[in-house]
Amino acid sequence: MAQNEESAKRFWGEFYGPNMGYVEEQYELFLKDPDSVDPSIKVNFEKYGEPVWESQNEDLAENVHGTASINDVKKLTSAMKLVEAIRRYGHLEADIYPVGLQKDRYSKLVDPTTYSLSEEDLKNIPASWLWDHAADANVKNGLDVVSELKKYYTGTIAFEYDHVNNDEERQWLRELIELGNARLSLSDEEKKQLLKRLVEVEGFEDFLQKIFVGQKRFSIEGLEAMVPMLDHIVKNATAQKVEHIMMGMAHRGRLSVLAHVLGKPLDKIFSEFHSSPDKELIPSEGSMGINYGWTGDVKYHFGAVKDVKDGEETNTRITLANNPSHLEFVNPVIEGFARAAQDERKHSGYPEQDFNKAIPVQIHGDAAFIGEGIVAETLNLSGLPAYTTGGTLHIIANNLVGYTTDQKDGRSTRYASDLAKGYEIPVIHVNGDDPISCVSAIKIAYDYRQKFHKDILIDLVGYRRYGHNEMDEPRATQPTLYQDIDAHPTPAKVYANALQDKGTIDSEWYSSLKEDREKALRSIYDGMKEDVGNPEPKRMPEVLKNGLEGFETAVSLDELQEINTQLLKRPEGFKGFKKVERILKRRENMLEDGNKVDWGAGEALAYSSILRDGIPIRLTGQDSQRGTFAHRHMVLHDAETNDNYCPLHGLERTDVTFDIRNSPLSEAGVLGYEYGYSIQSPETLVLWEAQFGDFANAAQVIFDQFIAAARAKWGDKSNMVMLLPHGYEGQGPEHSSARLERYLQLAAENNWIVANVTSSAQFFHLIRRQAAMRGREEARPLVLMTPKSLLRNQRVASAPEEFSEGKFQPFRNQPGLKISKKNAKRLLIGSGKVMVDIEDALEKAEGKFDWLRILRLEQIYPFPEKDLLKEIKDMPNLEEIVWVQEEPKNMGAWNFVDDYLRKHLQNHQQLRYIGRPDRSSPAVGEPNVHKMEQNEIIKSAINPIIGGDSQ
């Protein structure tokens, strides 16, 4: 406290004459309304409090209206504004562009003349009046202050942090910058090693260009400093024993990062240009690749894993995620990787998180960062309890052009990084030609992340030496920019020249460095074995073809009753919402003989029994704690205190976590995150629930490029579950269909399971089977159409013995209909809610239905073909197979099941379709029209005369 008082006295002691009177007047205004005074003065009142004049100034204080004019005061306040402007807007004049029209920038916002200040005016102002660190920097007057601050804020490294609302963060950054600690001071040997690293990267890219002329590689040239920046992250993370670095990046520079940071063998990279078989190559020490799938991918999509060892002990594992051409969509995936690595799941309740176990690193393209909505979705996750990873290190690989699109056509903002400012993420701009500034920027970013556990972004400004890929001709679309690039030396050459000018190296040392790199690469290439014929095509693992039958999922009735009793217990004093508690209370006797278990209760029993089996669960979605349709109620709220309680956290004899969270209004971002979590933590059952099934439309890239295809392309194995509410209740086109047809269109090579179940017991066994597959070769995702209106329909409720006996049935007999295989003439097959509607109609109908055999297809893919064939063989008088659905003919499952059904038709049999006709919209908007259509479908399905379309 005494130190603060002394600092205030020293500061106010610099004022004299009329300045003192002016400051006192301003302080009186400040006390009435802080916003009524100039911000540059306000900040001093907030920091130093009431003006306190030193004794030697008392005489001057008595004569505040002395000889100095009000103009002196204006000069002082103008100088204060200038100093603050340099902090805020210095980046507008910073030397951050190596090439292009912006490389010599000027901003009037940091020009003293804008504030009516001359050099003489600034010289007449004591330095300490304008800057706290004047004494530290050994500057004497205002002109010195301006010069010094411009050196810090307008050089090859520049800062934007005024948008960060946290005072501690801003102060930390400001002091780091203004004490001269932002730019690293490297020894001569460190500078030479930095140059050597740049030469290694440049030499690698140059070698590829010469040997594999015209082949796509999306080179790093112009942004080579990215590699030593990543080196810095690895070095510090290893020293601090961070267990994981989770990296995601698009194509630009990916091969160089794989080679130099992940240690991917160079001969392996060369062979991929030649398409040599993998068996001809031996990975280098300390590097291991991800197990690739059977269809493979192009070389600049693959990821890799590297263990960084300290002696015999592995300190840090670096993972570069596989990434498709949908650029930024890997962002949430690697965040899910990181969170899964950070979470400790070996206890009941929510996981305990350790930010230091994993650091996410995202490398973005400049056009994609500002252009792709998935970036904003992922940034929004960064501060949310369910999704935070303790800060991500972002690097924009800024090559100034988006494919062939200029910046003026690609974004509405000045910088590609401006999106981050809306999330209070500090931004560091840095010139890619100055590698010392680049590694300085990454050090600041790393230290900031470790201290504040927040995201931070580096805008690494460089260029691309060639077009978007090496087959493009950029001079057709950016002629003047490429004239500049063609004449511009490489970053390594720019840095080498700077070191030569300072006498750190000579030209021979640099030339020798380049020659040695060329010889080393040539030796590796020449030493490769010749391609010995075409490689054998890889095949899908055999276990995926028939890996769903051997799982026992029943749970004894005694254990289910014990679980149910514990789910109804509450902490002492907990006052739950009465209406919700009444609903849950009804479950008390549901497992007794003669009673039934509804959907919500069956789901609770499924999750509880899985936890009892020692399998942690993570369930997220926009309203998943309560359930969009108010059926789940797995997080209860005290009606008086708003404290939360999850009944599944109160289960006895569980030692794993149940992590149930409400997500933000995001699909692509959250689904990508959960997919990443499931890859990194295969022992966890990860479920994502769409609010309505059609909401998953907004995450189609994640389904297409990752969940459906990742194992075949890259070998990434996920066991996650997607719960997509689906069913036609007259709610219109938006919330009827979960677009079942899209997932069936993607179904192949046993890549996932697509199901549409109609009972709580079926759901119970299906989810338990999914959990049992975790970490095994049989593992695959599950896309599950879940009910809406059926959630409280007693027709989907199941008897207790259906949980304690049996297992999941891909085909299920239609309840309430007597089985008469001998007399059956029509085999009616359908899936989902329409089959429950038919059950209801049959119960109300008159007459016999021994001519009708009905099966519910509960697992659509993999299609249970053997079960179907057995059923058909058992019906000697079968005349027709009829598929019924409530979706339009060009949607739903019809186009998928058609081939399977037609395949087993006999000569005298026909296949017919009953359902809505082809439509462009999933459903009508008028409830009465919907009801009429639905009734016609059901009537046609159970009427022996009225049929659908013969196929």
Image (cartoon, grey):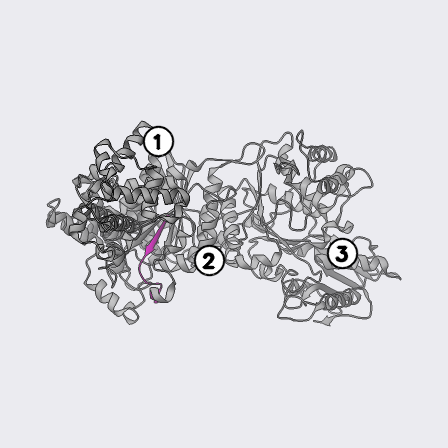
Identify residue type, mark 3.
Val
Question: Which range is magenta?
Answer: 394-406
Q: Which mark is residue 373?
A: 2
Residue behind mark 3 = 836
Marks 2 and 3: which is nearer the front? 2
Name the side, left or right, on which 536 lies relative to 446.
right
**Residue 130 quadrant:** top left
Q: Which mark is residue 126?
A: none
Q: Earlier in the sequence, mark 1 or mark 2?
A: 1
Question: Is any part of residue 392 visible from this angle?
Answer: no
Q: Are marks 1 and 3 in contact (CB under 8 Å)?
A: no
Marks 1 and 2: which is nearer the front? 2
Q: Residues within 10 Å of mark 3 (few under 14, many from 20)?
A: many
Asked if the stretch drawn in magenta spans residue 396, the answer is yes
Question: Is any part of residue 681 visible from this angle?
Answer: yes
Residue 619 lies, in percent from the top left, at: 58, 44
Quarter of the picture containing the C terminus is: bottom right
Assign the magenta stretch its main secondary structure: loop
Residue behind mark 1 = 312
Of 870 and 453, which appears nearest the observer? Answer: 453
Name the side, left or right, on which 623 lies relative to 802.
left
